[in-house]
Image (tube, rainbow, N blue to C red):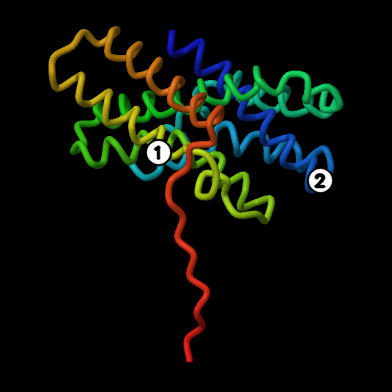
Amino acid sequence: MLTFIYLVAIAAEAMSGALAAGRRNMDVFGVAVIAFVTALGGGTVRDVILGNFPIGWTQHPGYIALVISAGLLTVLVAPHMHRLKRLFLALDAMGLVAFSLIGCDIALRMNYALPVVIMAGMITGIFGGVLRDVLCNQMPVVFQRELYASVSLVVCCLFLGLRALDVNHELTTVLSFVVGIAMRMLALRFGWKLPTFSYQQRWE
C-alpha cells in the first residue's frame, strides 16, 4: 500500500514544485528541476545523512521519469489547478504522511536510535518542500503556516509508540496514516497553527 501511495505522493509533490517554479516565472528546465527536488529531495537528504547507499531513486529510474513528467504536465494543466485544489491538498497530505512513515521505517531497519528515527521521518516528509522554497527564494512554508512539520512529528511518534506496544505492523501503519491525514486536513480546515515568535528589537 505504501508503495502505491509513495508513487502518488511523489507525483503530487512534483506538481507542487512545478507550481512554485511557475510562480517564479522559471523556464521549463527550471520547472523540471524544482519538481524533481521537491518530490525526491527529502529522501535524498535522509539517505545522505543516514549513510543509506545507494540513494533510493538511483535504483528506480522510473521515479525520475514520473516526477519530471508530473512537473511538465503541470505546465499544461495549471490554468485548471484551482478546480482540483482540494484533491491536491489531500494528495499532498498523503505524501507528507507516507514520506514520514517511509523515513522512519528505513532508519529503523538501519538500527538507529529512536530520536534519529524520528528526525529521519521528518526530514523525508518535509525537506523536499524546504528545498523547493529555498530554491524559489522564499521562506519555507513548513515553518510559517498551517501545521505541517508538526503533523510529520506526530505521525513518527505515533508509529513508534504503536510499534513499541507490539501492535501489528500493518495496523500500525494504517492507524498512523489515517491519524496523520486527518490531522493535516483538519489543520487546513480550521487554520490550526503553532504559536509564532516575532522579534523586532534591534541590537544597539
- Frontmost residue, 188 versus 65: 188
Identify the image quadrant of residue 129. Answer: top right
Residue at which label 1 appears: 150
Describe residue 103's horizontal placement relative to residue 198 as left or right: left
Residue kind at label 1, given as amino acid type = Ser
The total of numbered circles placed on residues is 2
Q: Mark number for residue 63?
A: none
- Give the residue displayed 51% in from the left and 83% down from the top: 202
Q: Position of residue 32 (x, y in %)?
A: 73, 35
Whole-Å distance between the Cαs marked 1 and 2? 31 Å
x and y percent of residue 133 in the render? 62, 48
Q: Secondary structure at mark 2?
A: loop
Q: Residue at x 34, y 27 (%)?
A: 155
When asked about the image quadrant of residue 120, the answer is top left
Q: Is residue 39 left or right of residue 178?
A: right
Which residue position holds label 2?
A: 26
- Going from the N terminus, do you reach mark 1 or mark 2 first? 2
Which residue is painted at 83% across and 22% down in the image?
80
